[in-house]
Image: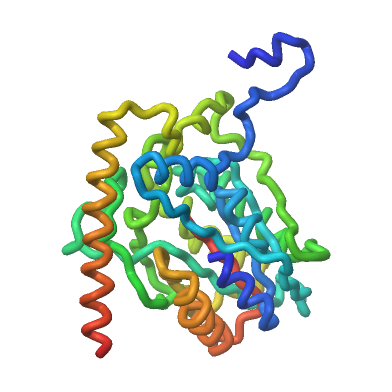
Amino acid sequence: MDENKQDGLGFAAEYDRPIPYMQRIRDYYVTLGYGTPYRWANYADVPFTKPTKPLSESRVALITTAAPYQPDKGDQGPGAAYNAGAKFYTVYSGDTAAEHDLRISHIGYDRLHTTAEDSNTWFPLPALRRAAAKGRIGEIAPRFHGAPTNRSHVTTLDVDCPELLARCRADNVDAAILVPS
Amino acid sequence: MSLAARHLEANGIPTVIMACAKDIVEFAGVPRFLFSDFPLGNSCGKPKDVASQDLTLELALGLLESATGPRTTMQSPLRWKDDASWKLDFSNIEKMSPEEIARRRAEFDRQKAIAKGIRESGAKAAD
C-alpha cells in the first residue's frame, strides 16, 4: 500500500523511482569484500549529430550486447543463472534478414523479476522489421552488430567502438539503435 | 554501450539507446536515451507483449527524429507493475542475510575465474 497516497497528495511511493544502480552495485561489492569500486564511464561533454534525412528514408542499424546461443556453453536461459561462459569478447555481426537466437545469460539482468524468456525485450529486430514494413524507417541495415561487455574501458574505446563504427560505415547506415541489456 | 553510442555520434551517425539503467546511461552521457523503468533485461518492452515492444521502439525512433540536443532522455510511460516494490530488490545488500552474501561471494569468484579463462584462451588464439 502506498502510504503517501493516504496523505492525499497523490505522490508515488518513495521507492517508486529509477533504481539507483550505481549505488546499489557499489554497496553490494563493498559488502562482498571487493573494496575497489567499479569506475563507471562518465563524460562532461556529449556529442550530437542531427539526422540528415527523414527516418522513412533512413537505413537503421541495430547494436546489441546479447550473445548468440552456444549450446556447448551451459545454461543460457530462459531463467539461467549468470553465465560468464557465454560471454564474447570481440565485435560480431549477423544478417538482419535471417532469424537469430540471442541470449543474455552473460549479463547481469534482473533475475528475480524477469526471466529472459522473450528475446524481443532485448533484441528488437522483429519490431524493427514491423517498423520497416509500414514505412516508419527506410530499411534495416543488412547486418546487426554485437558489442562485447565486461571489457576494460580502454578496450571498449580503443578496439570495440572503432570496430562498430567501421561496420556501420561499411553498411552506410544513417542511424543506429543501441540496446544494452 | 553508451561509449559506442557516443563514438558513432561523434563520427556523424545519430544514435538512440534503449535501456533500463537510467543512472548508469545518463552518467556516461549519451545523445538520446529511451528509458524504460523495467527490470534489467527489458530494454525493448515487456515479455510476450508485442504492443509494448512496438510502442517502446516507436518512442526510440521518435527520439531520433525529435531530439534537439544531447542528453535527451525520454521515459516510457509504461509501468512494469502497478506495485513498484520490485525496485527494492536488485542487488540490495540491505535485504540479504549473511549466508546469502557468503553464497554470492563464492559464486562471484567462480564466474570471474571462468571469464578470465575465456579471455586468456582468446588471447592465445589471437597470437
Counting from the top left corner in percent of width and height, residue B17 is at 61, 61
B63 relative to A154, above or below: above
Camera-side residue of B116 and A63:
B116
Residue that lies at the very extreme toward the right in this rendered image: B68
Query: Coloring scheme of the render?
Result: rainbow
User: Total number of numbered labels?
Assistant: 0
Q: Residue at x 77, y 79 (%)?
A: A52
Which image quarter is the N terminus of chain A in?
top right
Does A150 sit left or right of B119 as displayed? right
B66 relative to B82, above or below: below
Counting from the top left corner in percent of width and height, residue B7 is at 61, 76
Q: Residue at x 39, y 72 (%)?
A: A98
Residue A77 seen in render: no
Q: Residue at x 28, y 49 (%)?
A: B108
Counting from the top left corner in percent of width and height, residue A160 is at 47, 78
Q: Residue at x 70, y 9 (%)?
A: A6
Camera-side residue of A19 and B20:
A19
Residue A8 occupies quadrant: top right
Residue B96 occupies quadrant: top left
Residue A124 seen in render: yes
